[in-house]
């Protein structure tokens, strides 16, 4: 079977036949902005400082954006706070119509957004196009959900009171997002926030601010009023001080963060001082389990999709692949065949499925994780080294086995194109290992035994389970984790709950 040809995330677009637009072309795109976005105005940092945005594929500087600080962030929060006073009183239909207009513009400009995303994140153009479609889907979805935020009337225990619960927007939402899904992590949060009647201050990742600014540009063109969406850009050096303002300002009602567990814990603590609403989507350590009754072709296809998509840099990526002993060798052989079909290179070039890792730090981490495993006795089936001929940030798609818990790959979130294959004997054993981590975001398993499917689906300690399926995200579904992978849910109708609170109204009468 041609597994690669069937990768669901490699959405065929006209890009797949084309080469990367030259640097100058990216810089000249109308949606590529070099200023931050506050109160529907393009603004510099008050200090005048900027930082560079580079292409991880080749190190080329794509542009500069403002390196904002505490004062700039306070200013943006203040603007969002003022805008909330009118935005919260718009009707659900008004918000729905504006979100729909934003969605239409995002769709009209999807090709350009995908090109900007590939340039700053390194992900293959076909994947970027897939992400843009997925990201826009959240605005589409929340434009509909805006009109379906129901309340409740309950039977009163007394004859002289009537009782009702309604939902109200919480206020200003601070949205801190990562680089691995530069568009979708913003729309998943901002779509829900705006639908609920909240305004927002977005702090995109320092690696990928251009996608965020392009989307904000289209929000303004769609007619979303000033101050409702603001984007504060800052370098990694300033992230802590900007983050502190967002987490401690009494004018901010809630924080939604997607990123690493360590930073998430820090922000959670900081939010305690003003008792904010907090929604966290943190690191995962997803088990990918293949039981002996599984359809092996389907399992390999799923493993490729959920291990090698975005070069393994997603929080729902399979981290450890557990395969039942009796089919272990067969599965690894098939996986090897499929992985050999992956193509490493500049994400904007034709046919590339594996772009660079996002930055030098990530490339070094993946290299060290593999070196540590090999030093302690792991067997390398494929790859195992940086693809240095491509540049410092590229890593060969890798399969390793013979790993144990003394190795870092066994315990840590890899965030790279390294499939770690581990044999297991029984369902009990594999569940115990899969659950023996403090993470609990996604888990996947392949089985054709119906009783086993129910048992394992219930017992995996995660917020999301892919059953005979390696890709599970969708605007219609509730995304989120348990344990230290986070709190709250994004997408689906539950996504709105993060940005609204229940207000109880009690009516007294004769
Ligand atoms: P990664 O290691 O994958 O970059 P991070 O959790 O460090 O993940 O980054 C996710 C987001 O959190 C980015 O927007 C980053 O700038 C931001 N961030 C990092 N450190 C802090 C901090 N101390 N306070 C607020 N935001 C932060």
Image (cartoon, helix red, strand yellow):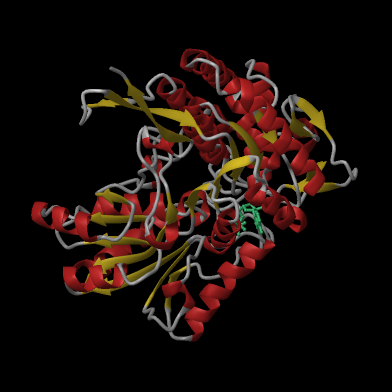
Taking the spot 24% from the left edge, 70% from the top edge, the residue there is 430
Image quarter for ligand 1 equals: bottom right
Would residue 23 be found to the left or right of residue 95 on screen? right
Q: Check the image and report above or below for 331 versus 29.
A: below
- Residue at x 62%, y 64% (from the top left corner): 363
State the image quarter where residue 156 is shown: top left
List the single residue furthest toward the right: 48
Residue under the image location 66 percent in, 25 percent down: 83
Q: Out of 412 and 281, give the one closest to the viewer.
A: 281
Q: Looking at the rendering, which quadrant does residue 262 occupy?
A: bottom right
Residue 348 is left or right of residue 130, and the answer is right
Q: Position of residue 462 (x, y in %)?
A: 32, 57
Residue 323 spot, x, y in % from top left: 26, 67
202, 273: nearer the viewer: 273
Quadrant of residue 444 in the image?
Answer: bottom left
Residue farthest to the front, as pictured: 510
x and y percentages locating residue 226 in the rendered image: 70, 22
**In the image, 111: left or right of 92?**
right
Reply above or below: 61 against 317. Answer: above
Asked whether residue 349 is in view, the answer is no
Picture residue at 28% right of the left edge, 25% below the top: 161
Q: Position of residue 236 (x, y in %)?
A: 73, 56
């Amino acid at each position: 079977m041609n597994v690669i040809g069937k990768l669901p995330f490699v959405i065929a677009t006209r890009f797949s036949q084309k080469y990367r637009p030259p640097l100058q072309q990216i810089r000249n795109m109308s949606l590529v902005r070099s200023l931050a976005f506050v109160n529907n105005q393009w603004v510099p940092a008050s200090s005048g400082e900027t930082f560079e945005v580079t292409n991880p594929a080749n190190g080329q500087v794509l542009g500069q954006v403002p390196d904002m600080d505490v004062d700039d962030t306070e200013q943006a929060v203040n603007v969002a706070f003022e805008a909330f006073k009118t935005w919260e009183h718009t009707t659900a239909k008004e918000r729905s119509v504006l979100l729909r207009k934003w969605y239409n513009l995002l769709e009209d400009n999807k090709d350009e957004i995908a090109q900007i995303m590939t340039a700053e994140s390194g992900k293959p153009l076909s994947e970027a196009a897939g992400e843009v479609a997925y990201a826009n889907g959240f605005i589409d979805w929340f434009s509909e959900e805006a009109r379906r935020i129901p309340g409740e009337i309950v039977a009163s225990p007394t004859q002289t009171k009537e009782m009702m619960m309604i939902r109200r927007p919480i206020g200003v939402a601070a949205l801190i997002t990562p680089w691995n899904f530069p568009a979708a992590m913003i729309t998943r949060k901002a779509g829900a926030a705006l639908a609920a009647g909240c305004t927002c201050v977005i702090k995109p990742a320092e690696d990928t601010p251009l996608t965020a600014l392009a989307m904000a540009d289209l929000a303004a063109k769609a007619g979303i009023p000033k101050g409702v969406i603001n984007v504060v850009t800052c370098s990694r050096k300033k992230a802590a001080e900007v983050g502190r303002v967002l987490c401690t300002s009494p004018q901010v009602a809630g924080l939604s963060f997607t990123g690493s567990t360590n930073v998430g814990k820090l922000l959670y603590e900081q939010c305690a001082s003003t008792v904010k609403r907090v929604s966290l989507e943190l690191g995962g350590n997803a088990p990918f389990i293949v039981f002996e009754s599984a359809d092996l072709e389907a399992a390999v296809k799923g493993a490729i999709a959920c291990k090698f998509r975005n070069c393994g840099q997603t929080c729902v990526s399979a981290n450890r692949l557990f395969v039942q002993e009796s089919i272990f060798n067969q599965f690894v052989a098939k996986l090897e065949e499929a992985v050999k079909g992956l193509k490493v290179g500049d994400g904007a070039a034709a046919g590339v499925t594996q772009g660079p890792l996002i930055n030098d730090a990530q490339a070094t981490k993946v290299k060290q994780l593999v070196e540590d495993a090999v030093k302690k006795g792991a067997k390398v089936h494929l790859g195992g080294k940086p693809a240095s001929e491509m540049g410092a940030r590229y890593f060969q798609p890798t399969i390793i086995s013979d790993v144990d818990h003394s190795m870092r790959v066994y315990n840590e979130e890899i965030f790279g194109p390294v499939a770690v294959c581990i044999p297991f004997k029984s369902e009990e054993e594999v569940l115990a290992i899969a659950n023996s981590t403090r993470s609990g975001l996604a888990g996947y398993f392949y089985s054709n035994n119906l009783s086993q499917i129910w048992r394992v689906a219930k017992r995996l300690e995660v917020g999301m389970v892919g059953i005979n399926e390696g890709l599970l995200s969708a605007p219609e579904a509730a995304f989120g984790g348990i344990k230290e992978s986070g709190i709250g849910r994004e997408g689906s109708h539950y996504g709105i709950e993060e940005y609204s609170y229940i207000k109880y109204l009690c009516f007294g009468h004769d």
